[in-house]
Image (cartoon, helix red, strand yellow):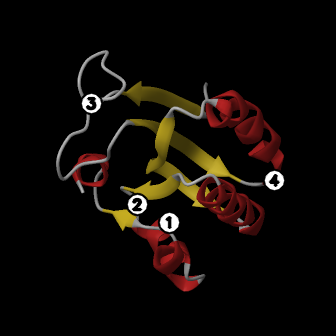
């Protein structure tokens, strides 16, 4: 079973220069994190995200957390490093649709105050 599923979206068909007023400009990517995520799966996460992070056309990376049931401190650290990496490139990391237990962890460690969080992926895209 795949740890991540991903898709990329252009706001206006195949026109990479199109902008949607009031929404994420340019391209964005959405990645669904699935299951229990800890250090045993961190290398797999990094490998699956590496080529997608190399694609500089995506101005935002939205992590869909709706299917993630657990994450530990190593995964939290990786999410923070993703945020730092993307910020330095002028891109954004956004968290979306976390289950209650995962959201509790995000709030407890302050992740939701550092990285934008939205209740749904659709909200994150239309922000």
Which residue is at 50% across, 69% downward? 115
Residue with the mark numbered 4 = 39
Whether 86 is drawn above or below 53: the answer is below
Which residue is at 57% across, 34% downward? 4
Task: Name the residue at the top extreme.
Answer: 14
Whether 34 is drawn above or below 75: the answer is above
Please identify, in this view, whether the residue under mark 3 or under mark 4 is nearer the observer: 3
Circle 2 sits in a helix, a strand or a loop, which is it? loop
Q: CA distance from mark 1 to mark 3?
A: 34 Å
Residue 125 point in image, percent of width and height: 29, 47
How crowded pointer 3 is (Cα within 10 Å; few <14, some 14-19, many 20+) is rated as some
Q: CA distance from mark 1 to mark 4?
A: 16 Å
Which residue is at 63% across, 50% downward? 36
Residue 107 point in image, percent of width and height: 49, 80
Circles 2 and 1, Cβ within 8 Å, touching? The answer is: yes
Q: CA distance from mark 3 to mark 4?
A: 39 Å
Residue 124 point in image, percent of width and height: 31, 53
Which mark is first along the chain, 3 or 1? 3
Residue with the mark numbered 3 = 18
Q: Which numbered marker is on residue 86?
A: none
Give the camera-side residue of 62 and 3: 62
How crowded pointer 4 is (Cα within 10 Å; few <14, some 14-19, many 20+) is rated as some
Which mark is first along the chain, 4 or 3? 3
Residue with the mark numbered 1 = 102
Give the camera-side residue of 73 and 78: 78
Which mark is first along the chain, 4 or 1? 4
Circle 1 sits in a helix, a strand or a loop, which is it? helix
Circles 3 and 2, Cβ within 8 Å, touching? The answer is: no
Circles 1 and 3, Cβ within 8 Å, touching? The answer is: no
How crowded pointer 1 is (Cα within 10 Å; few <14, some 14-19, many 20+) is rated as some
Residue with the mark numbered 2 = 99
């Amino acid at each position: 079973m795949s740890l991540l599923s991903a898709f990329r979206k252009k706001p206006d068909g195949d026109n990479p220069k199109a902008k949607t007023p009031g929404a994420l400009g340019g391209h964005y990517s959405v990645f669904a994190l699935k299951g229990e995520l800890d250090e045993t799966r961190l290398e797999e996460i990094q490998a699956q995200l590496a080529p997608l992070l190399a694609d500089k056309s995506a101005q935002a990376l939205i992590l869909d957390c709706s299917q993630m049931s657990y994450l530990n401190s190593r995964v939290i650290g990786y999410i923070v490093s993703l945020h730092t990496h993307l910020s330095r490139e002028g891109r954004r990391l956004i968290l979306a649709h976390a289950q209650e237990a995962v959201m509790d962890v995000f709030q407890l460690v302050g992740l939701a105050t550092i990285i934008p969080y939205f209740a749904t992926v659709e909200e994150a895209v239309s922000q």
